[in-house]
Amino acid sequence: MKKFAIGCGVLVVLAIAGLLVIAIAGGSYNHLVKLQQGVNSQWAQVQNVYQRRADLIPNLVATVSGAANFEKSTLTEITAARASVGQMKIDANNAPATADQIAAFEKAQGSLSSALSRLLVVSERYPDLKASANFRDLQAQLEGTENRISVERGNFNSAVQNYNTAIKSFPAVFYAAMFGFVEKPYFTATTGADKPPQVQFDFNKK
């Protein structure tokens, strides 16, 4: 009888311990889901600000192409760069799973940034263009968008850091990979990436 009571006691203790483990693991799992959704949500924000820049470019091209003798090669370059960005097929609702996907995205966006910078530099040679209210408005919108891109990239990296830290911490480290929680890649800094492309103009310059 005593052995039976001891056996029942052991079973109760084991059952309680099992329930505690399940509760802790379940809470940890739910936390990982929340962090993963946070990464995806922040990725959508990154996509939104880059898309805003792409949406401004057709109006910019239309405005500068109205300037007499404006360099056609510059307009062709930025149009081609924008088209290349549009061919990037990364789900706006799911953050990239590999560093290669992030690198491809950054390469396309970097080409567009370079083409945009060159177009704006060339525009310096056209006083009438610089005096255009429409051009000045587009310049201001682009400047604000570039600043927002920098902010959202930083927010994305912060979300990724929180998620990556969580999947490598106890107890998630024992089961995260088994349930599909794998490490996410970061945006990496490139030369000059700490500052948005210069889109300021000296409108007083003759």
Image: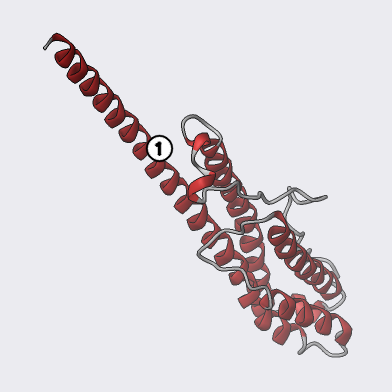
- Location of residue 149 in the rendering, given as x and y in whole percent from the top left corner: 63, 58
Q: Amino acid at mark 1?
A: Ser
Task: Tell which of 28 and 39 is nearer to you.
Answer: 28
The quadrant in which the N terminus is found is top left
Q: Which residue is drawn at the image coordinates 60% and 51% (left, top)? A: 151
Q: Is 172 left, or right, of 130 in this rendering?
A: left
Task: Tell which of 25 and 197 is nearer to you.
Answer: 25
Determine the residue located farthest toward the left in the rendered image. 1
Q: Which residue is drawn at the image coordinates 84% and 90% (left, top)? A: 68
Asked which quadrant contains residue 130, the reply is bottom right
How many numbered markers are drawn? 1
Colouring method of the image? secondary structure
Instruction: Assign a secondary structure to mark 1.
Output: helix
Determine the residue located farthest toward the top in the rendered image. 2
Residue 169 vs 130, above or below: the answer is above
Q: Is 137 left, or right, of 125 in this rendering?
A: left
Q: Which residue is drawn at the image coordinates 66% and 49% (left, top)? A: 186
Asked which quadrant contains residue 197, the reply is bottom right
Q: Is 173 left, or right, of 101 in this rendering?
A: left
Q: Is 192 left, or right, of 12 in this rendering?
A: right
Identify the residue position indicated by label 1 in the image.
28
- Location of residue 86 in the rendering, given as x and y in whole percent from the top left corner: 67, 77
Please tell me how crowded label 1 is: few (under 14), some (14-19), or many (20+) other residues with Cα within 10 Å.
some
- Location of residue 202 in the rendering, given as x and y in whole percent from the top left corner: 79, 63
Task: Tell which of 60 and 81 is nearer to you.
Answer: 81
- Location of residue 40 in the rendering, given as x and y in whole percent from the top left corner: 51, 57
The quadrant in which the C terminus is found is bottom right
